[in-house]
Image: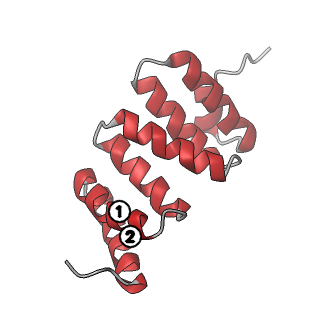
Amino acid sequence: MPKGTPETHVIDFRAAEQLLAARDPRGAVKLLDTVIAAHPENTAARLLRARAFFAAAQLRPAELEFQIVLEREPDNAFAHFALARTLERANRADEALRHFRLAAALDPRPDYLAAARFDPS
């Protein structure tokens, strides 16, 4: 198989977005594996792959990818929220709540605030 170019990696990334939107997370992961192998520092690709892992119910790989994103972007509210959803789905509610609260603190969107379950008093 020929080595990808930056252009083919962009095409693969965009195709992976489309596959995820079309509910083919495993296909998206396959495309993103090559992109990330060539560009391991690409946080956007890692975030998309984490979302694809989550959609495919591959919770441990999703968790690891979200953690990598958060190591690089600790203020990424969406990554905190998505990691929390992943932890919640893995029956790790206490760990999830911490990330729900971080997401809500970083971005007070209604869905983040509701998930954070802040005491209204």
How many marks can you see? 2
Res. 19 image quadrant:
bottom left
The residue sitting at the left extreme is 1
**Residue 5 shown left or right of residue 46 in the figure:** left
Q: Give the number of the mark in front: 1 or 2.
A: 1
Quadrant holding the N terminus: bottom left
What kind of residue is marked 1? Leu
Res. 31 image quadrant:
bottom left
Q: Residues within 10 Å of mark 1 (few under 14, many from 20)?
A: many
For residue 32, the mark is 1
Residue located at (38% from left, 70% from top): 13
**Residue 68 shown left or right of residue 119 in the figure:** left
Q: Secondary structure at mark 1?
A: helix
Quadrant holding the C terminus: top right
Res. 105 image quadrant:
top right
Give the image location of residue 97, x and y in percent. Answer: 60, 23
Q: Is residue 28 above or below residue 99?
A: below
The residue singled out by tag 2 in the image is 13
The tag earlier along the polypeptide, 1 or 2, is 2
Q: Are marks 1 and 2 in contact (CB under 8 Å)?
A: yes
In this rendered view, identify the residue nearer to me: 36 or 99. 36
Give the image location of residue 35, x and y in percent. Answer: 38, 68
In this rendered view, identify the residue nearer to me: 118 or 98. 98
Residue located at (66% from left, 38% from top): 103
Give the image location of residue 52, x and y in percent. Answer: 35, 50
Q: Residues within 10 Å of mark 2 (few under 14, many from 20)?
A: many
Q: CA distance from mark 1 to mark 2?
A: 6 Å
